Amino acid sequence: MSSSPPQPSEPERRGWGVDVGLVLWPSFLASCTASLLFFAAVDPALLKDAGPHLFADLDREAGYALGFMFFWVIGAIASTLSVYLIRTERRPRRKAGSGPT
């Protein structure tokens, strides 16, 4: 009687809540870093002169908030793409009869 080693099972599927956390938290941290670096060099009060007239009445705090949200959206898009690529990874199929003996 031979005992075969346990076969690796298919990875567990996590709920969508875990995926949302995997997207939002790293993108939040990236947005904090990007905002810190960007606004260390650029004053948001000066951006209202360089941007469209839509931002003409934008005060400094709103400029910081808008920039932070912009960086957060960009980070969330990048994180979503990463989670999607990991979840849809193609695994090579085993040939019939080529399993462990």
Image (tube, helix red, strand yellow):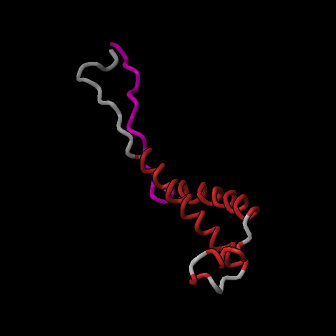
Q: Which of 3 and 33 is in front in this view?
A: 33
Q: Where is residue 28 in the image (x, y as percent from the top left)?
A: 62, 60
Quadrant in which the C terminus appears: top left
Q: Which residue lies furthest to the right in this view?
A: 40
Q: Does 37 appear above or below 52?
A: above
- Looking at the picture, tell me which residue is in the foreground, 73 or 60: 60
Q: Where is residue 32 shown, x and y percent of the image?
A: 68, 60
Magenta residue span: 1-20
Query: Magenta span has 8?
Result: yes
Q: Please give left or right for residue 2 compared with residue 32 in the image.
A: left
* Residue found farthest to the left: 96
Tell me where residue 17 appears, x and y as whole percent: 49, 60
Q: Residue at x 71, y 75 (%)?
A: 46
Residue at the (72%, 58%) spot, across then down: 37
| Picture quadrant of residue 61 | bottom right
Q: In this view, does 83 lie to the left or right of 21?
A: left
x 40%, y 30%: residue: 8
- Left or right position of 79 against 30: left
Taking the view exactly as shown, the residue that stands out farthest to the front is 50
Q: Is residue 96 above or below residue 86?
A: above
Residue 92: say if magenta. Answer: no
Identified at 70% across, 73% down, the residue is 44
Spot occupied by residue 69 in the image (x, y as percentages of width and height): 60, 69
Q: Quadrant of residue 29?
A: bottom right
Q: Is 82 rendered above or below residue 10?
A: below
